[in-house]
Image: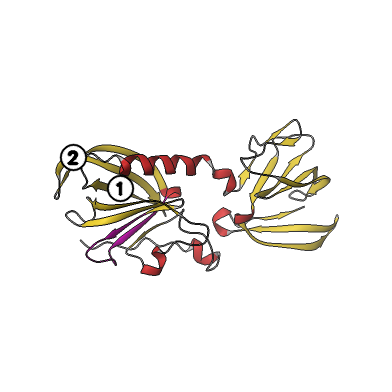
């Protein structure tokens, strides 16, 4: 059946090198878009997987990476799917009627992207193999639990006793006291942390008034004059809200 492409203008606004693979759902993409981007790696590769809902009766291969799940038809590689974990809402296993295996357990993935909802059903044509279910579920859970590495966070539970709660393998390169956040007219005095993953600022008088900005969500960083003196200006990506933060 004919399938419309689901494309986003967000990645275009953030430039050609923007990471879209984990956030978007794309149908029938160019083969070069199936190539793994820098920082993306393959976790599992399964042969003999049916796209039961979209291309029933069509056997293909399914690649699980750290950013997305890719399905490609064995007959025509231009028939494919790229499903980012950030678009996945729920993952379940249920019984489905398939053309190639009849009634069997299949993987149901509910997604939401660009205001539309999509349901995908995948069936492993190899009998008694749980890899299709266990791998995708485990990787999606790990992705969901590691959002602070990727997403801008406001007012999070990230500071305890005036110290940054470090993520696994995160290191603090510098801690700068007496940094003003210029988001308001009078400014707020606080503390600035620079790590290998992100920059974090919190107000000295209220630790829950904070912001965590991963480098991956920075579109540009510059130094400009302000009424408080020279300020560090961080312009976040469009997908993070396109905010301008001044310190």
Q: Indicate left or right for 29 with 75 as reference.
A: right
Most common secondary structure along the magenta stretch: strand
Is residue 90 in view from this perspective?
no
Is residue 135 in view from this perspective?
yes
Q: Which residue is mark 2?
A: 104
Q: Which residue is mark 1?
A: 119
72 inside magenta stretch? yes
> What residue is drawn where x is 21% and y is 64%?
75
> What residue is drawn where x is 40% and y is 46%?
88
Q: Residue 118: x and y, percent? A: 32, 50
> What residue is drawn where x is 70% and y is 41%?
210
Q: Residues within 10 Å of mark 1 (few under 14, many from 20)?
A: some
- The span shown in magenta is 70-84
167 and 14: which is toward the camera: 167
Q: Residue 73: x and y, percent? A: 26, 61
Classify residue 91 by image quadrant: top left
* Foreground label between 1 and 2: 2
The quadrant of the picture occupied by the N terminus is bottom left
Q: Residue 100: x and y, percent? A: 14, 50
Circle on res. 194? none
């Amino acid at each position: 059946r004919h399938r419309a492409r689901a494309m986003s203008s967000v990645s275009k606004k953030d430039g050609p090198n923007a990471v879209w693979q984990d956030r978007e759902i794309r149908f029938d993409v160019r083969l070069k878009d199936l190539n793994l981007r820098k920082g993306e790696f393959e976790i599992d590769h399964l042969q003999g997987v049916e796209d039961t809902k979209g291309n029933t009766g069509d056997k293909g291969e399914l690649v699980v990476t750290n950013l997305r799940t890719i399905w490609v038809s064995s007959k025509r590689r231009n028939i494919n799917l790229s499903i980012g974990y950030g678009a996945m809402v729920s993952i379940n296993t249920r019984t489905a009627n398939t053309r190639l295996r009849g009634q069997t357990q299949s993987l149901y993935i509910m997604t939401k992207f660009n205001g539309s909802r999509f349901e995908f059903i995948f069936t492993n044509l190899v009998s008694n193999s749980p890899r299709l279910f266990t791998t995708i579920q485990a990787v999606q859970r790990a992705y969901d639990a590691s959002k602070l590495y990727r997403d801008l966070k406001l007012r999070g539970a990230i500071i305890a006793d005036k110290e940054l709660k470090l993520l696994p393998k995160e290191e603090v390169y510098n801690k700068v006291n007496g940094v003003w956040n210029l988001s308001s007219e009078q400014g707020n005095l606080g503390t600035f942390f620079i790590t290998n993953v992100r920059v974090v600022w919190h107000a000295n008088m209220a630790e829950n008034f904070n912001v965590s900005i991963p480098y991956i969500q920075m579109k540009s960083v510059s130094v400009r004059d302000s009424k408080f003196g020279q300020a560090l200006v961080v312009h976040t990506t469009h997908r993070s809200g396109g905010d301008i933060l001044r310190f």
